[in-house]
């Protein structure tokens, strides 16, 4: 039994702020080359009619203090419109090779336009064009129609860029579409899970209050942690 308990466990005394430990797990997973998208997380949103839906998105920032993660998406997508109706979301990271899982529950809010612009600038041209070319989550007749739509929008955009080329340092860097940007997920609850031998895993959960202050940030209460049976 001693072997199981000491093999792979959370600290005996749980940290006051779990987000730093969670971020160290995220950073460790991202620095190892063990899977193509170590920053992938499953995001669950809830529809107007209370139906949950899940999909993978990529975590582009993990901010331990004050405690939120950021992903980027189309603001007219299904997930975004569900978030507009109900900002309560949950997400899960899972790194099988590390035997670790992080579950987060919290509130989603849009990133500032500065945060969205800054990230959009780091994307390569192809990814920037995709953000303009795809009306994410909307139906389209065929794959050919989609490619045609994307080519047409790319032509319009690069033509406009050539007109502005003199003023722009890089003529082929596009501006961010207004319907595309970041979403921050502020954690009100987090669970850290580590695999244990014979399924004697180690788990702890922390909760805190989130108070929306001015529409785009939260004041946060103190984290309270509890160890859970696996
Ligand atoms: C590995 C992987 C990474 C993905 N990353 C993103 C992402 O960062 N943002 C995004 O909008 N969609 C991403 N997707 C696509 C989503 O899973 C989903 O298909 C899309 O966002 C539409 O979801 P919705 O219709 O529920 O809004 C990713 C899919 C996979 C498999």
Image (cartoon, rainbow, N blue to C red):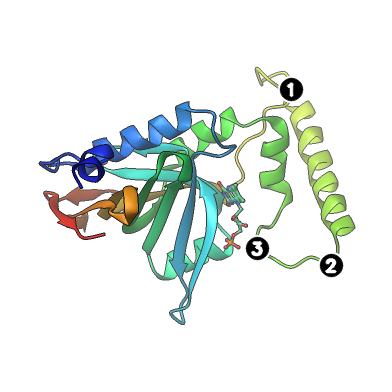
Query: For the residues marked 3 and 2, what is the alpha-carbon distance in whole angstroms?
Result: 13 Å
Q: In the depicted view, which residue is nearer to us: 177 or 39? A: 39
Q: In the depicted view, which residue is nearer to us: 155 or 184? A: 184
| Image quadrant occupied by the C terminus | bottom left
Residue 49 shows up from this direction: yes
Query: For the residues marked 1 and 2, what is the alpha-carbon distance in whole angstroms?
Result: 35 Å
Q: Are marks 3 and 1 in contact (CB under 8 Å)?
A: no
Label 3 near ligand 1 (CB < 8 Å) = yes
* Residue at (67% x, 33% y) in the render: 174
**Crowd around label 2: few <14 · some 14–19 · many ≥20 (10 Å):** few
* Residue at (74% x, 22% y) in the render: 165
Question: Can you say whether 62 is above or below 75 in the image?
Answer: above
* Residue 68 position by quadrant: top left
On the picture, is 178 further left or further right than 94?
Answer: right
**Residue hosting label 2:** 141
**Crowd around label 3: few <14 · some 14–19 · many ≥20 (10 Å):** few
Q: In the depicted view, which residue is nearer to us: 70 or 215? A: 70
Q: How many marks?
A: 3
- Which element is circle 3 on? loop
Give the number of the disc on residue 165.
1
Label 1 near ligand 1 (CB < 8 Å) = no
- Which element is circle 1 on? loop
């Amino acid at each position: 039994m001693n072997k199981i308990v000491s093999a792979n466990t959370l600290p005996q005394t749980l940290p006051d702020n779990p987000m730093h430990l969670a971020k160290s797990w995220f950073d460790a997973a991202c620095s190892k080359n063990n899977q193509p998208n170590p920053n992938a997380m499953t995001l669950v949103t809830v529809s107007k009619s209370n139906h949950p839906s899940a999909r993978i998105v990529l975590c582009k920032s993990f901010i331990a203090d004050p405690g939120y993660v950021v992903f980027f998406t189309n603001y007219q997508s299904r997930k975004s419109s569900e978030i507009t109706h109900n900002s309560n979301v949950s997400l899960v990271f899972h790194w099988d090779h590390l035997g670790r899982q992080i579950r987060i529950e919290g509130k989603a809010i849009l990133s500032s336009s500065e945060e969205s612009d800054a990230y959009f600038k780091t994307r390569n041209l192809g990814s920037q064009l995709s953000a303009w070319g795809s009306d994410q989550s909307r139906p389209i007749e065929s794959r050919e129609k989609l490619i045609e739509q994307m080519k047409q929008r790319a032509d319009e955009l690069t033509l406009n860029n050539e007109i502005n080329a003199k003023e722009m340092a890089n003529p082929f860097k596009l501006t961010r579409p207004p319907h595309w940007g970041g979403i921050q997920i502020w954690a009100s609850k987090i669970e850290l899970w580590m695999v244990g031998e014979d399924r004697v895993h180690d788990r702890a959960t922390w909760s805190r209050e989130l108070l929306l202050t001015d529409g785009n940030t939260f004041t946060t209460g103190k984290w309270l942690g509890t160890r859970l049976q696996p």
